Image (cartoon, grey):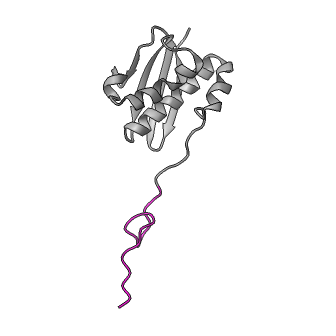
């Protein structure tokens, strides 16, 4: 089996995922994923596509991820892995789509407007 290459994005995080048949080794930015994401909730997010499709330990995953915080990066990796599993087998798509893992979350930080301190916040109004 050749290497499957996919992309996952979330907020400002971009994850390039390379997946191939293997023993379930997952590296993120040349480190073990448990070292990059020490919080168990984030590890569970990353493993969620494998759990749903019953493919835990069947694929080696190498990820390059840049931008954003650790939560955005974890969700970007999750989307990339989900897309890779669909490339492997099309019958994985309904399972992943039902859990909302095939959807690119479009929510981004709103831009700051001129004449305001933040995107929506206004400077203090003084009547007198």
Eyeballing the image, is 88 above or below 71? above
Eyeballing the image, is 19 above or below 16? above
Q: Is residue 7 visible?
A: no
Q: Give the range drawn in magenta.
A: 110-128
Q: Which residue is drawn at 38% across and 81% down?
A: 125
Q: Residue at x 41, y 31 (%)?
A: 42
Eyeballing the image, is 65 above or below 54? below
Q: Which residue is drawn at 64% across and 17% down?
A: 89
Q: Which of 16 and 71 is in front in this view?
A: 71
Q: Where is residue 23 in the image (x, y as percent from the top left)?
A: 45, 8
- Quadrant assignment, res 94: top right
Q: Is residue 56 visible?
A: yes
Q: Where is residue 117 in the image (x, y as percent from the top left)?
A: 37, 68
Q: Which of 39 and 124 is in front in this view?
A: 39
Decide if residue 31 is on the left or right side of residue 12: left
The N terminus is located in which quarter?
top right
Q: Where is residue 66 in the image (x, y as percent from the top left)?
A: 39, 35
Q: Which residue is the extreme one toward the front?
A: 40
The prevailing secondary structure element of the residues shown in magenta is loop
Q: Where is residue 90 in the image (x, y as percent from the top left)?
A: 68, 20
């Amino acid at each position: 089996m050749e290497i499957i290459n996919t992309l996952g994005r979330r907020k400002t995080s971009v994850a390039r995922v390379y997946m191939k048949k293997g023993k379930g080794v997952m590296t993120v930015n040349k480190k073990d994923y448990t070292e990059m994401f020490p919080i168990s909730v984030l590890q569970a997010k990353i493993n969620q596509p494998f759990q749903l499709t019953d493919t835990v330990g069947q694929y080696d995953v190498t990820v390059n991820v840049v931008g954003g915080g650790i939560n955005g990066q974890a969700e970007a990796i999750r989307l990339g892995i989900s897309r890779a599993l669909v490339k492997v087998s099309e019958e994985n798509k309904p399972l992943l789509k039902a859990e909302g893992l095939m959807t690119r979350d479009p929510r981004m930080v709103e831009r700051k407007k001129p004449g305001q301190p933040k995107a929506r916040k206004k400077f203090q109004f003084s009547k007198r």
